Amino acid sequence: MELPVGWSLVLIVTALWNLLIWPQFFKRIVTDDRARDSAGKPTKFLKVHAVLIGVSLSLGLAVGVLGILTIF
């Protein structure tokens, strides 16, 4: 696949952004009072955010790989 270098760099920067930001957000979600109930079990709040973050990290990784493959 051919893609202009500028767009490849946009994909790589987007991937880096996702891979750097979402893990930090997850750390904050895990320590949030709403993440666990009184028995210490994960709440829907934690589960939903874990899924959203997992999907975002997967997409970030895919975009990064695509960016790297198109730059070379």
Image (spheres, grey):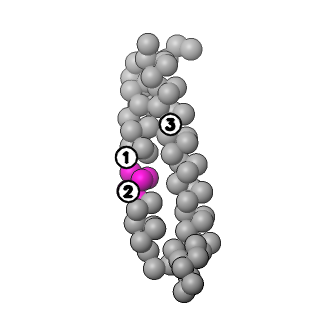
Number of numbered discs on residues: 3
Q: Residues within 10 Å of mark 1 (few under 14, many from 20)?
A: few
| In contact (CB < 8 Å): disc 1 and disc 3 | no
Quarter of the picture containing the N terminus is top right
Q: CA distance from mark 2 to mark 3?
A: 16 Å
| In contact (CB < 8 Å): disc 2 and disc 3 | no
Q: Say if 38 sits above or below 11 in the image.
A: below
Q: Residue 11 lies in what quarter of the image?
A: top left
Residue 33, percent across and down? 45, 79
Q: Residues within 10 Å of mark 3 (few under 14, many from 20)?
A: some
Residue at 39 percent of width and 38 percent of height:
16
The residue at the far front in this view is: 39
Q: Residue 51 lies in what quarter of the image?
A: bottom right
Of residue 70 and residue 57, the one placed in the foreground of this image is 57
Residue 24 colored magenta? Answer: yes
Residue type of the residue flagged with mark 3 = Leu
As helix, strand or loop, the secondary structure at mark 3 comes to helix
Q: Residues within 10 Å of mark 2 (few under 14, many from 20)?
A: few
For the record, the magenta segment spans: 21-25
Q: Residue 71 lies in what quarter of the image?
A: top left
In this figure, which residue is indicated by the disc labeled 2?
Answer: 24
In this figure, which residue is indicated by the disc labeled 1?
Answer: 20
Residue at 45 percent of width and 67 percent of height:
29
| In contact (CB < 8 Å): disc 2 and disc 1 | yes
Residue 31, percent across and down? 42, 71
Judge from the rendering whether residue 53 lies leftward or rightward of residue 27; answer left or right.
right
First of labels 2, 3 by sequence position: 2
Q: Say if 46 sits above or below 69 in the image.
A: below
Residue type of the residue flagged with mark 1 = Leu
First of labels 1, 3 by sequence position: 1
As helix, strand or loop, the secondary structure at mark 1 comes to helix
